[in-house]
Amino acid sequence: MESALRPRPIRRWAMARAKPRTEREWHRRFGVELFNGTWDLLEKRRRSREDDLRMVHMAHASRYHWSRVGKPVNFAIGEWQVSHVYAVLRRPEPATYHAERCLAICKAHRVGDFALAFAYEALARSAAVAGRRADLRKYLAAADRAGRGIAEKEDRDEFFRQLATIATRRA
């Protein structure tokens, strides 16, 4: 999920094969491995209850490791992934909590572009899971506006692909 130096919300980070030598490298390595492992589980067609539990723990652990070595954009992306996991598991309260954390980090640190768009996507997704139709409409509109501001076409396309997966029945 990393190209060059900029983390991206969906794509996998590339990870060096060398063993970590410092505590910072160690945290970064496990942040990357756990983030990618979470995505493997999210994409798995048939997850067991154990897979679901492992996915929750891995998302939280990845977010923790990034808290030790990352920047605000990494923190926001980590909160987004945790929210996404809970939304997929149809757990609206923690999905909403972590989506709100994602947006708060973006606002506090002036993180924009794809991270801000995905913060609104997470809020929309958690509202959909919770059945909060007014919030769903509000956050879908905010996500759409923020998504149109994503600078890189590839990021923008991926964002709108993800946004389209939110169930909007009766919104």
Image (tube, rainbow, N blue to C red):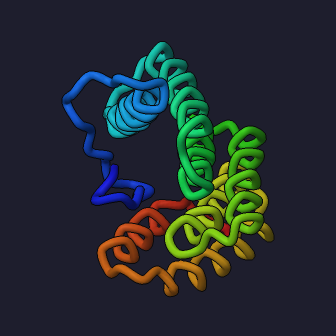
From this view, report whether residue 60 is shown above or below residue 132. Answer: above
- Image coordinates of residue 98 in percent, x first then y, are 70, 46
Residue that appears at 56% across and 58% down: 73
- Image coordinates of residue 136 in percent, x first then y, are 71, 67
> Which quadrant would residue 106 be assigned to in this image?
bottom right
- Image coordinates of residue 155 in percent, x first then y, are 37, 71
Residue that appears at 68% across and 72% down: 110
- Image coordinates of residue 146 in percent, x first then y, are 58, 80
Q: Quadrant of the C terminus?
A: bottom right
Residue that appears at 32% across and 81% down: 153
Q: Nearer the viewer, residue 6 or 163?
A: 6
From this view, report whether residue 71 is shown above or below residue 35. Answer: below
Say if residue 152 shows up in the picture.
yes
Residue that appears at 33% across and 34% down: 40
Q: Nearer the viewer, residue 166 or 112?
A: 112
Q: Residue furthest top?
A: 50
Q: Residue furthest front?
A: 22
Horizontal arrangement in the rendering, residue 21 relative to residue 110 (left or right): left
Say if residue 88 shows up in the picture.
no
Horizontal arrangement in the rendering, residue 4 relative to residue 163 (left or right): left
From this view, report whether residue 77 is shown above or below residue 153. Answer: above
From this view, report whether residue 8 is shown above or below residue 149. Answer: above
